[in-house]
Amino acid sequence: MSSPDFIIAKVRGMRGKLYEGERLYRLCSAPSVEELAATLAPGEPIGDTIGLQRHLTAQHIDGLHQILIHLDGWQRQLFLWILRRYQVENLKVLLRGWATKAEPSLLTAYTVSLPKELALPTQALMNSLDLEALIAQIPVPQLREGALTGLGEFEESGRLFFVEAGIDQAYLAELLNRAERARGEAQTPVQELVNLELDIYNAMLVLRALFDYSILFNKVRGLFAPFGAHVGLRVLEEMRHAPDLDAAAQLIPPAALGTRGPAPSADAVETAMWENLYRAANRRYYSCVLDFGAIAAFYYIKRVELRNLIKISEYIRYGEHGGAIRKQLIGRVAEPVGTP
């Protein structure tokens, strides 16, 4: 690995350029997506909201890849797998494109260019005669096996949900596996942050599968990611028996939300869990002075930045501005006096 001092200095410099606090808030007042793009990507031929989001995601990944190239050993292996999250997202887009026979231009619009370590054989995937043949073309063994987990249910129901959930499960299982290989002072912060992500995933999987998609709990049971620190099987079983979505959300433990009271409404619970992870990442970022823990924390902070920027672009696209958007963001700061 390059000098820890050099890498951490690089990360600190990147942190200073993030859109957070008042700098983030100012974006919420952009009168249009075009004006927002002029601020976030000056001089770039962005086009529409999807183009802006693709550009922001590509920049996000490129910044993180600039950290990866300075790592080696278990740190590189873990951080490379962290970045594989974006390969997973591209793979899901290609799966949906294959199922709907989407035009290549649509796939280009909704996928993001990735570094060569994360590239997918797009043409081979799209030329597959059936889903089993497509899955066989996935170049990462863990993701390939994960996709196969949901193939049987797909063949019965025609729903890609099971294949996508199998891929997510495999991604998160290997993420935890690599996080558990962390050594030294980084071990505790890395595992804390990954466990919070596992809590979010499993809780939202149950909420969406049961209450949005009307999928039976026992069909979802085999698709859980490894359990995190707070949302285990007992909690998920309790959520299963809740009468409705809001009641199920209320059963998420306060520790997974970083609060002492019950969960907010189902509409706000995912944001609340990410807010908790963001706060934990900030604590670890500032406490891990010259340690890989600060790098792992920065990834989650930067991931929240991207989430916020995409949310701002979506709200502006639909005509919302100012305070209405600010209330939806993670890492909120106190409202300025006189804020609309």
Image (spheres, grey):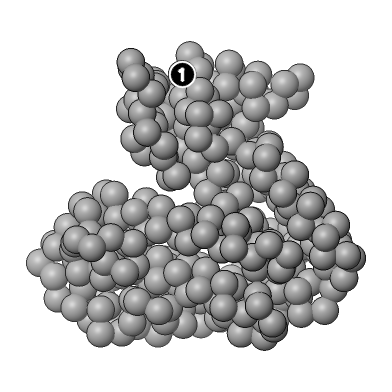
Quarter that holds the N terminus: bottom right
Q: Amino acid at mark 1?
A: Ser
Nearest to the observer: residue 44 or residue 337: 337
* Residue pointed to by mark 1: 29
- Is residue 143 depicted above or below 91 in this figure? below
Please indicate, yes or no, whether residue 123 appears anywhere in the rendered image: no
- Is residue 245 depicted above or below 140 in this figure? above
Name the residue rendered at 10%, 67% in the picture.
243
Name the residue rendered at 75%, 44% in the picture.
13
**62 displayed left or right of 304:** right
Give the quadrant of residue 46. Answer: top right
Name the residue rendered at 60%, 57% in the picture.
286
Quarter that holds the C terminus: top left
**222 displayed left or right of 166:** left
Nearest to the observer: residue 334 or residue 91: 334
Provide residue 322's location: percent of width, then percent of height. Answer: 39, 22
Name the residue rendered at 51%, 82% in the picture.
149
Nearest to the observer: residue 270 or residue 25: 25
Give the quadrant of residue 146. Answer: bottom right
Residue projecting furthest to the right: 2
Nearest to the observer: residue 182 or residue 120: 182
Residue projecting furthest to the left: 243
Please indicate, yes or no, whether residue 272 appears anywhere in the rendered image: yes
**56 displayed left or right of 204:** right
- SS type, badge 1: loop
The crowd level at tag 1 (other Cα within 10 Å; few <14, some 14-19, many 20+) is some
Give the quadrant of residue 8. Answer: bottom right
Provide residue 328's location: percent of width, then percent of height. Answer: 36, 38
Provide residue 93's location: percent of width, then percent of height. Answer: 58, 54
Provide residue 259's location: percent of width, then percent of height. Answer: 28, 60
